[in-house]
Amino acid sequence: MASLMDDLIDVLTSENEEYGKLAVLSKEKKQVIINADVPALEKIVDKEQDVASTIQNLDNRRRKVMHDMAVVLNKPEDDFTLTTIIDMLGSQPKERERLQNVKDQLKTTLEEVRKINEQNQILLKQALDMVEFDLTLFRSMRSAPETANYDKNAYNTGEVLGSSGFDAKQ
């Protein structure tokens, strides 16, 4: 059981490190979104996918360790959580404290990633709204009505509304 506990703590520590990398990348992404630097955004997304793949592998490893612990302790796997394990470690304060610390660190890191991702989501929505506004503006300029602009020979010049500048001579 002690080796399983060490494995669990190692996996959780590694997951925390990877989520920390994800937080750093998300902060970088925030600035890239603000700068509208699409090539840099693509590079960050590629890096995020690599980190996410590593996190997925660590998560699978953590699930296996937790499954093995549940089997050893003859506990139902559905109810077997980190909190349950921490509660069960009442007679082993050292392991209990180590596991609690790793859980708290992971929780803090995940909260940081969540907040940054929410900010990035808002920024991306604003960027998409701005692009949609620009496209609508360009479409409306192309379909703007002709104005009644006549030259000195009384011919309609056919200029589109807004396409000519202000005539200071008039």
Image (cartoon, rainbow, N blue to C red):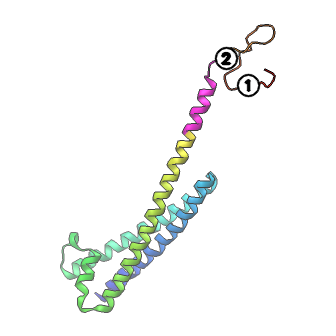
Left or right for 127, reference 56: right
Classify mark 1: helix, strand or loop. Answer: loop
The answer to whether the residue labelled 2 contacts the one labelled 1, judged by CB atoms less than 8 Å apart, is yes
Residue 106 at x, y percent in the picture? 40, 74
Q: Residue at x 44, y 72 (%)?
A: 109
- Residue at image position (81%, 7%) is 153
In the rendered structure, the answer to whether residue 71 lies left or right of residue 45 reads left
Q: Main SS type for the magenta part?
A: helix
Numbered disc 2: secondary structure: loop
**Mark count:** 2
Q: Can you say whether 88 is above or below 137 in the image? A: below
Badge 2 crowding class, 10 Å Cα cut-off, few under 14, some 14 to 19, many 20 or more, is: some
* Residue bearing the label numbered 2: 147
Say whether residue 123 is magenta.
Answer: no
Residue range highlighted in magenta:
132-147
Question: Which residue is at a point 25% across and 87% down the rendered structure image?
Answer: 89
In this view, the residue in front, 133 or 45, is: 133
Q: Position of residue 39 (x, y in %)?
A: 63, 53
The three-letter amino acid code for the residue at tag 2 is Thr
Q: Residue furthest top?
A: 154
Q: Which residue is mark 1?
A: 164
Residue positioned most to the front:
170
Q: Amino acid at mark 1?
A: Ser
Looking at the image, which residue is at 60% across and 57% down? 32
Comparing 138 with 169, the one in front is: 169
